[in-house]
Amino acid sequence: MPELLRRHDVGLLDGYIACMGAGVVFAVALLNCYSGPLARWDTTLAVVDAIRVTLAAVLVAIAVMFELAGHLRKLVAAPLSLSILMGLAAILPATAILKLHALAPAAVLLLLSLRMLMLVARDGNWRRAVAPLLGGAAIGYWTFLLSYVDGYKMPWEDVSTMLGQVHVDLLFHSGIVNMLRYYGIGSTGVDGTIPFPYYFGSHRVAEAFSSILDIQPLTFYSAIFPLLLGPLFVAMFYFFAVSMHGYILNRDTSDHQVPGTRGSLFWLLIAIVFIGVLPLRFRRDLGLFDNVFHSESFGMGVLLAYLPGVFLFECMARRSPLRSWVVCMIVGSVFLGALCMVKLSVACVVAATAGYLLLRLSRSWLQRACGMLALAAPLAYGLWSTRGTPSGDSGPGIVDMIKPFAFLRDVIEPRLWPLSFIAFFGPIILFLLVRVIPLRARSPVTLRVRFNTFQLLDVEFAIVMVIVSVIPSLILSIPQASANFFSEVSYWFVLPMLAVILFERITSLSKSGKVACGRPAAYGAPYSSDESGHHLSELKRN
Amino acid sequence: MQGGNIESRPIVSGAANRLGLRAAIWRSLVGLTVVCAAGSVLNNVLSYRLLLQKQENQADVIAASFEDRKAQGEGEGGNADMQVRRNFYALLEGLGRDPTLHRGDTGVYVADPAFFEGAYIDRPSDTVLDRCAIQPFSIPALTGMPLVAGLFARHDGCKYESYAYQYLPHREIADAAILSKPCALAELRGLRKVVVIERKDRNFTASRLDCAKQ
């Protein structure tokens, strides 16, 4: 039996099915946009070909992540993190190889479909595949809709170009990609190739993919990039949820458990938190922009930022100290440097959160000092590379941008401030309530003891990340409401954590009800020592 | 002892019932909340699906009108502004597909004042830029070559702010006459060749200049 299907990995098979489903549904919905008169345009044929290649490459990357995660489990300390890294690294070579022959994408899709069927058949329970498939499909379709409806991208880029209705942001970024590609200079190209200080990581990625796919950067940004980002983002969202789930199961109970995300409830909850319950016409009014699916650099930044989050919870779940701090610091510093080149705001939030965790988890002051240096160096480089010119022609400096609550004043109507607060902080508040209050009410172990033994590191992680991401948003006034690029980072980290904790609580609530009614729980609840066990002991005492 | 056990049974049973009732109420509330949340999610998906359908229909209508015009030949009828825009961007896309122009030494000069007024582009509602400041981005984005224009020397009243405009040199062109000389502007920007785009009625032409040979 393959590693993926062993007892510890049944949850990953569900994720595998869901992420594959998300990718396929996204691509099918996108291809369906070209079924009208546009299907006869020459440029459309090139786009459709690029969609096929991109879909196959994305699915290969997802397959690498999940297949390796099963195989690496007993070989390395952080199998999920390593397999995610390998999957992300595989996507560009996979695209280049799949572009070589017209039949290659179809062949890969066929092979992956057979592989999925084989895994589900070996699992022996076809009905269990339905919930993750539907959940993944719903999330995939939602990412498709968000990408093309809410923002400035659209599948019919050729039509909007001919009408002069292309969004300026698409033109701006496409121009930069062309200047990098043909002139090797980071410039907008609006008046010669005058360079400007900026982080060009996402533009380099767009340059590489548009070159391989042989399409214009404008077409790539409009139609292809969302397909590249959406399914991979869903996969990272899932992996972060799984790693956090593993941490909770192994920290809260004495027996070593692994995340078991099987069941329709988990997929229903993850679809609900991902898509959101607020009516869409209010979301933007309340300051929720879903920038992940609109800003290419921000989307890539948050996607990459999940990686250290997965690594953290994987390591904490194993309860074993890291063997090589030096290697971790070097790798972390390089990673943060790369993140700075993709999106500086995301890198700042990640660095600040990592700084807190460093202070919490390090064993000596030497480790802390070296770690802080490893965090500060790439951030300093990132800030230096986007610095303005001494002449003062480069727009507002950081001091000029300090205008407390300008984001609220400029973007959100005062009458909506309370609702905006609830919309943004609702997930973290709900997470804290659901996570902490039951522990405090029912457990004999105090919160202080849990804090000292790192059993609430997920809570600390969420609180610190929200604080460090919200403070810049509230203090700085960046043109075009860009302060949101700080606060939204924590929002996308809290959502998977919320889905996991709601799943755990609702599951344990259901089990506790069965216990109270005299029916034993079918299997050990994660909170059995705190809740289910509590009822039994109370009855025994009586 | 036995009597004690018999007496405690109703107490245990009552406590269990109370706990069971409380758990049942909680389960019902949680279930209702999850169902409502799923309904909201479905509403969000369907409302966005409707919006996408509208966009798709618009795109299909426009694409069909383009095809009809192509089939009937490019006449003088129809929306003149739309036709001019279409001709302009078709030319830019054609330049963008020409590999001989992408050797890192060519710029684009637009000899059309309407271009610098933003005549061929719409302004989205969510940007700080005016049409005149949006229009220049169409050249590098579609042709793959930089525009050579001397934007800050034109004094056309356009606010070139944000979107990296602030990094362009403001005062390097002293003689305004240079603005009508494509090769002089190209050389100022370190480029050896320039493609000059001119408007003739509703059509646009592109001519290539090798500044080194002039």
Image: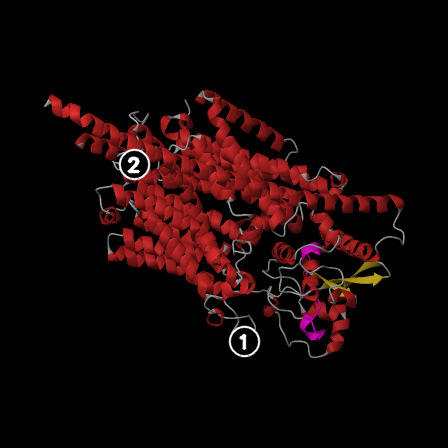
Relative depth, front residue between B67 and A492: A492
Task: Determine crowd level at label 1: few under 14, some 14-19, many 20+ residues with C-alpha closer than 10 A.
Answer: few
In the rendered view of the protein, which quadrant contains the C terminus of chain B? bottom right
Q: How many numbered circles are shown?
A: 2
On screen, B54 above or below A15?
below
On screen, A413 above or below A541?
below
Q: Residue at x 46, y 26 (%)?
A: A128
Q: How far apart, in angstroms, are the residues tagged by discs 1 and 2? A: 61 Å
Report the predominant secondary structure element of the magenta stretch: loop
On screen, A60 above or below B105?
above
Mark carried by residue B14: none
Relative depth, front residue between A269 and A199: A269
* Element marked by disc 1: loop
Assess whether residue B157 is covered by the magenta stretch. yes
On screen, A352 above or below B148?
above
Q: Amino acid at mark 1?
A: Ser
For mark 1, what is the residue?
Answer: A391
Q: Amino acid at mark 2?
A: Tyr
* Element marked by disc 2: loop
Residue furthest left as drawn: B1
Bounds of the magenta span?
B141-158
Mark carried by residue A527: 2
Q: Position of residue A25 (x, y in %)?
A: 58, 35
